[in-house]
Image (cartoon, rainbow, N blue to C red):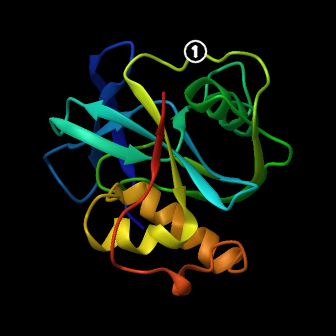
């Protein structure tokens, strides 16, 4: 098995570090990003709707429809981070949260992990919630998910991986075969 012979931090920001790793089979370094682990949570309302967020992503210069997500903060467990992100971004609270799995977001460049959670029963919190700036809450009926995916409206690769984990581990929750591929009807909450 190849071995790392040296590792150096080449560049550092509050958000990530660029790490040069030297491997015994190459004279050139391999570069990766070291950053906090991610969490993402698939939340379902009592009306069988996915709770999503719509936000502008400067990296891709467009809006993206995504699951509530964020970083695992240093003083939190991944589960605590997922529960916090759900409330902060959407104003929904989970009565129960289950770990579906831990994924490697990009084995070629990223050193962090993605903690994937499921909250099958979420409720809007009673107090007035101020969502994070630039984030809109979107409720999508489960039967509309195939249409969003097939039309490219829901195309965040890590979110699609979370849907796949849910289908494999909890197929009864996302009975997507009954979906229609016609129109997209979902509600953006203000």
- Residue pointed to by mark 1: 130
Mark 1 nearby-residue class (10 Å; few <14, some 14–19, many ≥20): few
Q: Quadrant of residue 21?
A: top left
Q: Farthest bottom residue?
A: 177
> Toward the viewer: 183 or 121?
183
Q: Residue 2, percent across and down?
A: 37, 62
Q: Is residue 104 left or right of residue 117?
A: left
* 28 sits left or right of 23 in the view: left
Q: Secondary structure at mark 1?
A: loop
Closest to the observer: 4 or 164?
164
Q: Residue furthest right?
A: 95
Q: Looking at the rendering, which quadrant does residue 128 occupy? A: top right
Q: Which residue appears at 42% of the width and 74% of the height?
A: 146
Identity of the residue drawn at 67% across and 28% down = 87
Residue at x 40%, y 33% (from the top left corner): 34
Residue placed most toward the observer, 18 or 120: 120
Q: Is residue 135 left or right of residue 12?
A: right
**Residue 74 position in % (x across, y down):** 64, 21
Horizontal side, residue 182 vs residue 186: left or right:
left
Identity of the residue drawn at 46% across and 68% down: 144
Q: How many marks?
A: 1
Q: Nearer the viewer, residue 136 or 132?
A: 136
* Res. 60 image quadrant: top left
Q: Quadrant of the N terminus?
A: bottom left
Query: What percent of the width, then of the height, locates residue 102?
Result: 61, 56
Image height check: is 1 above or below 24? Answer: below
């Amino acid at each position: 098995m190849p071995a790392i012979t040296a590792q150096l931090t080449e560049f550092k920001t509050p958000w990530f570090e660029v790490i040069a790793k030297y491997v015994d089979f190459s004279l050139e370094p391999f570069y990766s990003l070291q950053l906090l682990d991610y969490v993402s949570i698939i939340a379902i309302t009592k009306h069988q709707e996915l709770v999503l967020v719509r936000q502008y992503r400067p990296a891709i210069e467009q809006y993206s429809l995504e699951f509530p997500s964020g970083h695992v903060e240093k003083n939190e467990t991944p589960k605590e981070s997922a529960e916090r992100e759900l409330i902060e971004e959407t104003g929904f609270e989970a009565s129960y949260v289950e770990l579906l799995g831990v994924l490697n977001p990009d084995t070629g460049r990223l050193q962090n992990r993605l903690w994937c959670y499921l909250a099958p029963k979420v409720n809007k919190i009673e107090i007035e919630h101020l969502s994070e700036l630039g984030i809109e809450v979107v409720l999508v009926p489960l039967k509309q998910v195939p249409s969003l995916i097939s039309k490219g409206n829901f195309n965040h690769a890590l979110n699609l991986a979370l849907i796949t984990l849910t289908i494999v581990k909890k197929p009864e929750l996302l009975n997507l075969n009954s979906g229609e591929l016609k129109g997209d009807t979902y509600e953006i909450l203000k």
